[in-house]
Amino acid sequence: MNPRNARISQIHTTQKGGRIPDTTPNAPEVAGEMPAASFDLVVEIEAGRQTMTGGPYTLTVSAIDDSTGGGAPALDPQIPPQRFGAPPFQRAGDAFSLVQIFNIPVPAMGVRGHLFHYTAVLHNADFQIVSMQTTERFLLI
């Protein structure tokens, strides 16, 4: 990794408390049970050592309902203000990494059987650092 750069290295959905990517993140563990009321969205960011100055950056993550072709703001995570620095970034070889997990409540109506994906954009104030990433499509049960 370039010491002056940062990127979204991974973004995926998983069952609540899980770490493995899951394309049906609220599916019940046992057939016949109710689907889970929430799922997790995992976003991992890598940053070079020269970005660890504590400077702010913006992380925007938006849910897209592929079944309707529109946004799904009810599934957007609430993202607190973001800053480069350790902590919360942890040393990872010559770079730093940060794993953020957002718990996403599943709306009671209007999403069952819909196909979704997330888009994520990270940038600093002067847009010298820009990274974009999307999740695999996932189905809400």
Image (cartoon, rainbow, N blue to C red):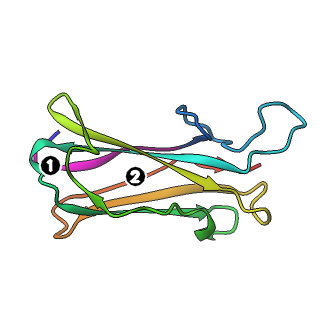
Q: Mark 2 points at which residue?
A: 133
Q: Which mark is residue 12?
A: none
Amino acid of disc 1: Met
In percent of the image, x 14 and y 51: which residue is there? 51
Amino acid of disc 2: Gln
Residue 110, image quadrant: bottom right
Quadrant of the snapshot with the N terminus = top left
**Considering depth in this image, is 90 or 112 the residue closer to the camera?**
90
Element type where label 1 sits in the image: loop
Element type where label 2 sits in the image: strand
Is residue 5 on the magenta stretch? yes
For the record, the magenta segment spans 2-12
**In the image, is 10 to the left or to the right of 1?**
right
Q: Mark 1 points at which residue?
A: 52
Give the mark toward the camera: 2 or 1. 1
**In the image, is 81 to the left or to the right of 3?**
right
Question: Marks 2 and 1, Cα distance to the nearest angstrom?
Answer: 21 Å
